[in-house]
Image (cartoon, helix red, strand yellow):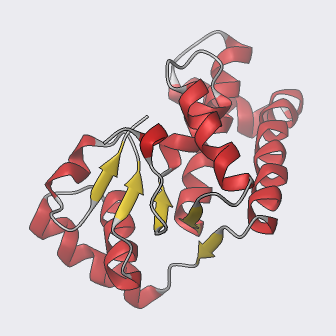
């Protein structure tokens, strides 16, 4: 299903890649993701995220900015520069601060942020093993299952095999 067509009066889990595309001016999905998030800001869409999504987006934003600054796609080199070079770390973390500022806007618009606890994380192992998912995907599915969320905004094709989820792609 196409993300711009989402008009249900139901909650939708927003996967990390939607935020990453929103912040990535080189992405073919930036405009669609930005328009979707504007609808969330206007309270036209009931968004849900998790602390795991936040962590994942911050990591990606740091790496993207580091890649841009260092003109490399070598993750090890980028991580090393963030850890050792104050100027690089400061510029990379500016992206994280921008994201948190944006999250505050979304929280004021009613976006719920679910905190993943030990029991939820542990139960996600069963879903991960059963559905052959990576850990963050398994946690996202567990959150959706636990809270009765039937919709997810994502480009992650691995989630298409989850029968109770409707996938909304940019």
Q: Quadrant of residue 72?
A: top right
Is 20 in front, or is 30? 30
**Is residue 150 shown left or right of residue 85?**
left
Q: Residue at x 59, y 42 (%)?
A: 36
Q: Is residue 61 above or below residue 77?
A: below
Q: Residue at x 33, y 58 (%)?
A: 137
Q: Is residue 130 above or below residue 33?
A: below
**Is residue 60 shown left or right of residue 95?**
left
Q: Is residue 57 above or below residue 74?
A: below
Is 162 in front, or is 116? 162
Q: Is residue 149 above or below residue 86?
A: below
Q: Quadrant of residue 130?
A: bottom left
Is 137 in front, or is 162? 162
* Circle count: 0
Residue 58 appears in the picture as rendered: no
Residue 157 appears in the picture as rendered: yes
Q: Which corner quadrant holds the C terminus?
A: top left
Furthest residue in direction top, as rendered: 71
User: Residue 120, position in %: x, y?
Assistant: 39, 84
User: Residue 103, position in %: x, y?
Assistant: 75, 57
Q: Residue at x 30, y 65 (%)?
A: 138
User: Residue 3, position in %: x, y?
Assistant: 44, 41
Q: Residue at x 55, y 51 (%)?
A: 56
**Is residue 133 shown left or right of residue 82?**
left
Q: Which corner quadrant holds the N terminus?
A: top left
Is 68 in front, or is 78? 68
**Is residue 73 shown left or right of residue 161?**
right
């Amino acid at each position: 299903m196409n993300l711009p067509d989402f008009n249900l009066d139901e909650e939708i889990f927003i996967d990390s890649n939607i935020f990453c595309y929103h912040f990535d001016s080189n992405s073919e999905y930036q405009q669609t993701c930005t328009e979707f998030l504007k609808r969330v800001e206007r309270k036209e869409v009931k968004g849900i995220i998790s602390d795991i999504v936040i962590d994942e987006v911050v990591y990606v934003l740091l790496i993207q900015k580091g890649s841009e600054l260092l003109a490399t796609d070598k993750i090890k080199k980028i991580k090393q520069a963030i850890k050792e070079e104050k100027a690089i770390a400061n510029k990379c973390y500016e992206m994280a601060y921008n994201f948190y500022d944006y999250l505050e806007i979304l929280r004021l618009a009613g976006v719920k942020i679910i905190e993943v606890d030990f029991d939820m994380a542990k139960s996600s192992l069963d879903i991960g093993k059963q559905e052959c998912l990576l850990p963050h995907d398994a946690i996202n599915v567990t959150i959706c299952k636990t809270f009765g969320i039937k919709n997810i905004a994502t480009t992650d094709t691995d989630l298409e095999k989850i029968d109770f989820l409707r996938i909304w792609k940019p």
